[in-house]
Amino acid sequence: MTLSIETRRDVMSRLAALAESVVVDIAAKLAALYAPDAVWRGAHPLNEMAGLEAIEETVWAPLLRSFPDLERRDVIFVGGSYEGCDYVAQIGHYCGTFRKDWLTIPATGRPIYLRYGEVHQIEGGRIVQSNCLWDILDVMRQAGFWPLAPSLGTEGLWLGPITADGIVLTETDPAQSAASIAQTLAMHGSLAEHDDRAGLTREALMTMPQKHYWHPKMMWYGPAGIGTTRGLQGFVDYHQLPFRKALQRPQGSFEEVVAARKAHGAGHYIRIGDGPYSVTGGWPSVYAIHNGDNFLGLGPTGREVTMRVMDFYLHHEGLIRENWVPLDIPHVLLQLGVDVFERMQSHFDHRPFA
């Protein structure tokens, strides 16, 4: 890794300062943290923008007006290099009192926890690209409106790492870091190479080679709309089997699957290990065709879909113990013909009848 510990500490401090600033100070806080032409990519409906003015006006000013006592709470902060680029990556929650409507979500006057997965590319001590998968759908849930069928997993706050060592601000063992990301990619390979056409059953997923990588007490923390599961059985029953039945993805060897995804603009921009942690992410990283039932409570649409995804892993006792999975569910739903913001607005539309 080429990113110094001093730079990592500085970025962490400036990210916290930005979250806890007041509206009039946003421009200065952004200038201290970002390159002038930085790109910001976030969950729908924020999506993509470039330049500090756009980031201030579209992202941070509305957020801080809605949550004037906002604070940032990282539970994982790691870093590493991939394909010549340096990154820091975080899991955590923004916490604040919901004082003013945000992204058309009605304010509640109560505390809200905005779950985030973030990956920031660093050059010369400044962020040049941010990838921010904030769980906006979960804010809707906390505000009292749910636009989908009930989640199969358990909704709520994500736990921090069981080892309580997720804030990595010291040098880690390069060999351990390499082993962590290697284990993750080997597990990815087992998932990619499983032939869904020949064996897409509960038993097949329970006995396929993925079982050699997951800890018996694994936790899989999914986004709002999917929820959290525990153990391989919970993962298969409440996420993996419904997901794979509904979404037909490229099949073949790992190399063939990667090539097919790339042909549709999907792949990883980050693959790093940092001690007992690893992180992968793509914008998007998944390509599939929605031809089956029961994903997010929807019937098949036959539509192509891509997914903006991050995966954060804790490697513990020789296996993958925990997996945090930020995923842009509102963007996925939009591709499938469901606008959750439109549904919400019609629910809270209290105009008198003619």
Image: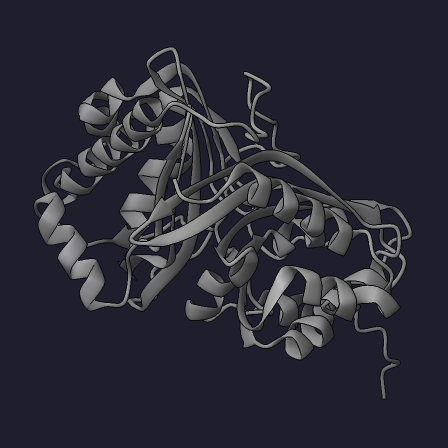
Up the image or down, 66 lies above or below 14; here it is below
Can see residue 101? Answer: no
Colouring style: one colour
Up the image or down, 286 lies above or below 204; here it is below
Q: How many marks?
A: 0
Residue 82, horizontal then vertical, whole percent: 33, 48
If the image is split into quadrants, where does the C terminus sit?
bottom right
Can see residue 171? Answer: yes
Residue drawn at point x = 35 percent, y = 55 percent: 269
Specify whether 211 is left or right of 238.
Answer: left
| Depth check, front residue: 315 or 109 | 315
Residue 33, horizontal then vertical, whole percent: 65, 59
> Residue furthest toward the bottom?
354
| Depth check, front residue: 275 or 118 | 275
Residue drawn at point x = 25 percent, y = 31 percent: 182
- Where residue 199 sits, quadrant-wise, is top left
Residue drawn at point x = 61 percent, y = 36 percent: 155
Residue 169, horizontal then vertical, whole percent: 57, 31
| Depth check, front residue: 166 or 354 | 166
Residue drawn at point x = 22 percent, y = 53 percent: 249
If the image is split into quadrants, where does the N terminus sit?
top left
Specify whether 284 is left or right of 153.
Answer: left
Up the image or down, 15 lies above or below 332; here it is above
- Where residue 320 sits, quadrant-wise, is top left
Residue 323, horizontal then vertical, whole percent: 44, 31
